[in-house]
Image (tube, rainbow, N blue to C red):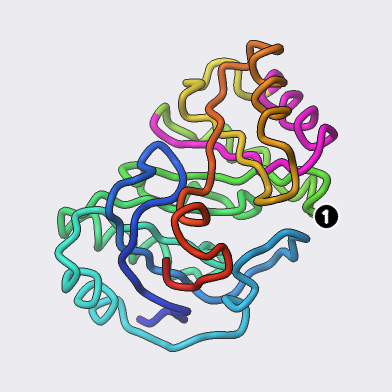
Amino acid sequence: MSLDICEIFCSLQGESTRAGLACVFVRLSGCNLSCSWCDTTYAKTQSVPMSIDEIVDQVAAYKCPMVEITGGEPLVQPQTPELISVLLEKGFEVLLETNGSQSIAPVNPACIRIMDVKCPLSGEAGSFLLDNFSHMTAKDEIKFVVGSRQDYEYATSVINTHLMNHPREHIHISPVFGKIELPDLAAWILEDRLGARLSLQQHKIIWDPDLKGV
């Protein structure tokens, strides 16, 4: 059983509630969406086949307890849930970052599933599979990448419609890097008493925003 891998590297987690912690990233190849602000377009074409055992061995070599499966869109590859289960069995803390258009039902709920609800500026609004809300656990996380006031209002509507009972510290409002004024976004969140977390992409602050492998 093999998967198409774009890259595997160790860095600091730049997003989610684990931001700032060391993490091994397994970036899978391929994606079913074409977001306007995508910063990993190379993941659509850069690909090397690897067996699950080879992936696990490379991850283990970093001697880091946390792993994130990302993309591209990891769940377009049917073997991804098996990879996640194997990593969990090996004792890793596993995060999955997914665009939400694919069902998370096959993914072991011991994995922390971070789903991205696409907003209008992305060009992929409406791609989120609403049934995924019913499969979430309290530890799963939701991210809205916003680049405008329209995006923010869209995110607010989804939160107030579908996520009223989800822990607000697991709901992220993440600005498109360089596309929106951070003081404005912070003010909107405070004014609306939204309770969501303002999440900045730390890796783009620490390193060159266009640098791969960080």
Residue 42 x %, y %: 60, 78
Identify which residue, 161 or 196, lies in the foreground.
196
Say which residue appears at 49% left-offset and 44% top-offset: 114
Q: Which amino acid does label 1 sit on?
A: Gly
Secondary structure at badge 1 equals: loop
Say which residue appears at 63% left-offset and 65% top-offset: 39
Region in magenta: 139-161
Residue 46 x %, y %: 54, 85
Side of 57 relative to 211 (left or right): left
Residue 93 x %, y %: 25, 49
Task: State the image quarter where residue 187 is shown.
Answer: top right
Name the quarter where the C terminus is drawn: bottom left
179 to 47, vertically: above or below:
above
Say which residue appears at 80% left-offset and 39% top-offset: 148
The residue under label 1 is: 123
* Magenta span contains residue 91: no
Side of 128 relative to 48 (left or right): right
9 to 94, vertically: above or below:
below
209 to 110, vertically: above or below:
below
Residue 34 x %, y %: 75, 65
Name the quarter where the N terminus is drawn: bottom left
Identify which residue, 176 or 100, lies in the foreground.
176
Say which residue appears at 74% left-offset and 50% top-offset: 127
